[in-house]
Amino acid sequence: MFFPIGDTNIEKGYRPVFTYLLLAINIAVYIYQIFLPRDLSVQFVNQYASIPVEIVNFQSLHTLFTSMFLHGGFMHLAGNMMFLWIFGDNVEAIIGTTKYIFFYIGGGLIAALAHVAFNMHSTMPCVGASGAIAACMGAYLVMFPKSKIRVILLLFFIPFNIRAIYFLGLWIVLQFRSEFLNYGASTSTNIAYMAHIGGFVFGLLCGMVFRNDIKDHHLRFHN
């Protein structure tokens, strides 16, 4: 298993202030959550996490949005924030903060609805920013396919570079594979693969539009 730790960043472009704000908000919400008493923490999650069976019945629709800022544990948060930091900032640097805000939230909503569509009877709360971040990854793949992603081989802690098209292409293939293997299984996973897939496809489509914005920038990349 390998994990991304950096990429080639854009030197000239819009400052990715919303990406940094998202990092701060997600971390702040998690800190708030872990310091709640256990019963209040459970109540907090149930109130703001997205539960498919409720969404299908048009209940608690606000959770399609609020669930994007909740996480199930430190590693869940840390992994999502690393992916957001690597892939979100360059997308925002090209399309600008205003457009990026709508794109990020739209990606999160589409991802959540994709999960609901394939888990309509589930009562399991769904949390995490990974659907919206998957949208950033999909857009990044289209916009910066030759960008170098710095990854580390977790088994041996060996860092190396790989082009975005290969890293992100492998990542989405693994999401489809995991969803296929999980579909119809007697025991369901706690990972919302369809949210990842839905967000990523949304990002791919948006990325095709965002590529036009690249022409408006004289870009340089640095490691």
Image (tube, rainbow, N blue to C red):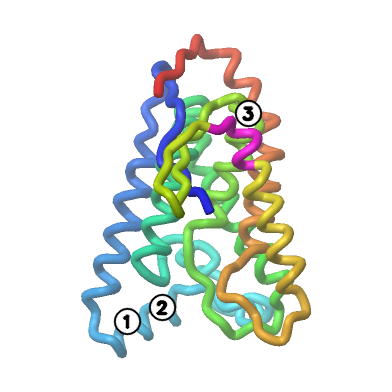
What label does residue 202 carry, if any? none
Q: Please report the residue visible at 43 percent of the width from the left and 26 percent of the height from the top.
A: 9
Q: Is residue 132 magenta?
A: no
Give the extent of the magenta segment: 162-168
Q: Is residue 210 above or below residue 134?
A: above
CA gap, disc 1 to disc 2?
Answer: 6 Å
Task: Classify residue 203 by image quadrant.
Answer: top right
Q: Nearer the viewer, residue 108 or 7?
A: 7
Mark 3 element type: loop
Q: Please report the residue visible at 31 percent of the width from the left and 64 percent of the height from the top.
A: 29
Q: Nearer the viewer, mark 2 or mark 3?
A: 3
Q: Please report the residue visible at 49 percent of the width from the left and 39 percent of the height from the top.
A: 87
Q: Nearer the viewer, mark 3 or mark 1?
A: 3
Q: Are marks 2 and 3 in contact (CB under 8 Å)?
A: no
User: On the image, numbered disc 3 is attached to which residue?
Assistant: 145
Q: Are marks 1 and 2 in contact (CB under 8 Å)?
A: yes
Percent from the top left, x then y, of residue 44? 36, 79
Percent from the top left, x then y, of residue 167? 60, 40
